[in-house]
Amino acid sequence: MRRAAGALLLALASAAAPAACSREFSVGISELGYGAYQQGGKWQGIVPALVAELSRRSGCPLVLAGRPRARVVLEFEQGQLDIMTSSLQLPERDRIAYFLPYSYTEVDLIVASNKIPRAIEDWPQQPELKLGMVRGIRLSPRLSAIVDTLLASRQAELSSDYENLAAKLVAGRVQAALIPSVIHVKLRREGQLPAQATTVDLPEATTDVLGLYVNRSAATSDDVQLLRQHLDAMRREGWVLALYARHVGDAEARRLFRNEAVR
């Protein structure tokens, strides 16, 4: 009887344990404001916490691999990394990977002072103003058209990263900058933006779906289904929203997720 009871407990424990993926997956990650950053030699922020929870729920071993963003993209496209996070859905990536959405991103305009025009479409008429942005940032079609005009007239310039862009804003080399919210919130809290800087919620900007890509060459369809199932549950339960609120504040998290209920 005791042996039968032990076997029953073992069977129940096995049934309760989360299913596991077919193999371990490497997850490319880069420093992107509160999205991911290093502190005390350890990864902190939204993405590391999300990956850890997804790994715990699914039973899939997900191992963070820190790289500069450009290298993450290159190694993922070459099949050297299995998963890439903090990504917009793009047709060229859909051909090589599965897109699993988990949150949203929006680009805001950070102006150095309240004396700077907040309507970016008026900037071409004010040639003394200069806009800054990071190379490779993706914008909505409407905002991209305005920025292309500013780049053509040299009223906009590109930076290599957001810390460099923030330094230009403080130094007065640019009067405003386009920065995603999870990045500019951290920059402001750390004193890397001008004290009098204000945030403009641009009507030309869009709230875009953000997700992770799972390389088709690395994962089986069962792996992808398992990860999708648990990631969707984390969204439905409000776990991801609560994670964002802990890092960027409740108001900013709810602004980013304002369309979540209808998706």
Image: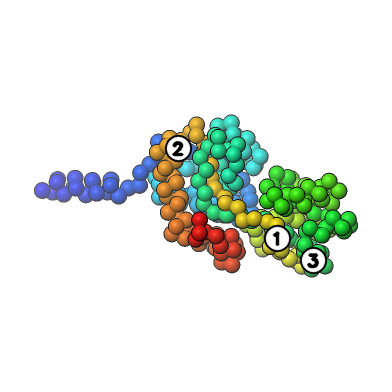
Q: Of the residues tagged 1 and 3, which is closer to the observer?
A: 1
**Inter-mark Cα distance, 1 to 3:** 16 Å
Q: Position of residue 73 (x, y in %)?
A: 62, 38
Q: Position of residue 232 (x, y in %)?
A: 45, 52
Within the image, what quadrant is residue 248 found in? Answer: bottom right
Residue 182 is labelled as: none
Q: Which residue is mark 2?
A: 24
Residue 202 is labelled as: 1
What amino acid type is highlighted by mark number 2? Glu
Q: Which residue, as the protein is rendered here, is positioned at the far right?
A: 128
What amino acid type is highlighted by mark number 3? Ser
Mark before the other along the chain sequence, 2 or 1: 2
In what element is the residue under mark 2? loop
Mark before the other along the chain sequence, 2 or 3: 2
In what element is the residue under mark 1? loop
Q: Which residue is mark 3?
A: 113
Q: Badge 2: few (under 14), some or many (20 or more) residues near its Cα, within 10 Å?
A: some
What amino acid type is highlighted by mark number 1? Leu
Q: Is residue 257 above or below residue 82?
A: below
Report the front residue among 238 and 192: 238
